[in-house]
Image (cartoon, rainbow, N blue to C red):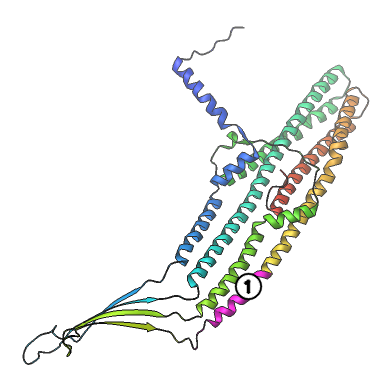
Amino acid sequence: MNRVFPSLSAPAVAVLLALAPVSVAAQQSLTWDQVKVRFEASNPALKADADNVAEMKAEEVTAYLRPNPQFSVTADGTQIAPHNGVWQPLAGTFVVPTLSYLHERDHKRELRLESAQEGTRITQSQHEDLERNLIFNLRSAFVATLQAKFILELARADLVYYDKIIDISQSRFKAGDIAQIDLDRIELQRVQYESEIQIAIVNLRTAKIQLLQLLNDRTPVDQFDVTGVFDFNDSLQTAETYHDAAVAARPDLQAALQTIQQSQTNHKLAISNGSTDPTFGGWYTWNSSNNNLNATQTLGLSVSVPLRIFDKNQGEKQRTQIDIDRAAQAAEATRAQVFSDVDTAYELVRSNVALLKPYKEKYNDQAVRVRDTVSYAYLHGGASLMDFLNAQSDYRQVQLAYAQLIGAYLTAAGQLNLAVGREVIP
């Protein structure tokens, strides 16, 4: 048979060749590491919180600023009526420019800077804690995408297998080996396989949409894909190992411990703020009407010392002292939560591994063997139609349960990473 192909001009061919790599690149699958890098670079919630850390860094500059000096000018002695009939309004005026400066004692500036720096470290730890939680959400969406892909491939493979059964059944019907009702029941069963494929497609697209949202990516769903190992690892360290790692890595615990340090610094600052800060001043005067003709210009100095009889900053001293204890109790509660999170996630991972092992070692192969054996027996008249349909149903249930357990394990592994504060299970 001769085929007629439309002719393409040289420029059109060049354009197609130029666009081909772009199309392939746009549809390439992303690994977990690539997805994580994109997330850290583009997630708006994470970037907004990073700006909060920068704002706290700017507060350190404000905290360490010195007090501004004060400058004032006083004019007095100006005549408001003529003297001996002569109007000389500026003849008796004397001018006093004054410069004063508040001297802060007891390391107030240094303590303010230290408190601001500790506040920045707390905010940085809280930012890392936000990233820790968002990474868990990202990994959950990534796992959901892998699981949906696995289930979709499984559903399509089941349909291909079942279509072969239908073809053989139709041949048997034509040969008179089976009745019309049996063939109809077999063909009607195909609807369930088609339904499972459509459900799997919807679940896959939904998972991709959630992942794209976290990445702040406007790529069309059909051009976006991820790839990764959809399997489990049965090697687990002891719970105590994860406890130690979590104490060292959890940013929320670090923030709680840093809050204790800041509370202690704030208490020192409250004590320092209760001390007296003198104000030193100096001035120059010019008095044209001074009786002493040699003293029309003078210099003066002053020291102003507040008498802290009533206000010694007692309330702030007491509040910051209480705040130290409150921060210590909050840190202890956070530590207990860390251990609880690790233990809970560890048990989830351990439980999923215990369930997955017999599936991988025994049940999956058994389900395939039973399906193939019963199908062969039915196609050769050695099994009933009900046995055949039940075997197909059992196989799908086992495979679906295995896929769901793998997804649960990967999610639990992500939860253990979340509880520890760093990736301990890839």
Percent coordinates x, y for residue 266 in the rendering = 56, 72
Q: Using the rendered view, name the quadrant where residue 282 is placed.
A: bottom left
Q: Nearer the viewer, residue 152 or 118?
A: 118
Residue 389 x/y as whole percent? 85, 33
Depicted 415 relative to depicted 31: above or below: below
| Residue 346 position (above or below residue 224) | below
Residue at figure coordinates x 55%, y 81% from the top left: 315
Look at label 1 and name its amino acid: Ile
Q: Does the magenta stretch include residue 104?
A: no
Q: Answer with the quarter of the image where residue 154 lies.
A: top right
Q: What stretch is highlighted in magenta?
A: 309-328
Q: Classify residue 269 as left or right of residue 333.
A: left
Quadrant, the N terminus: top right
Residue at which label 1 appears? 324
Give the residue furthest to the left. 85
Occupied quadrant, residue 192: top right
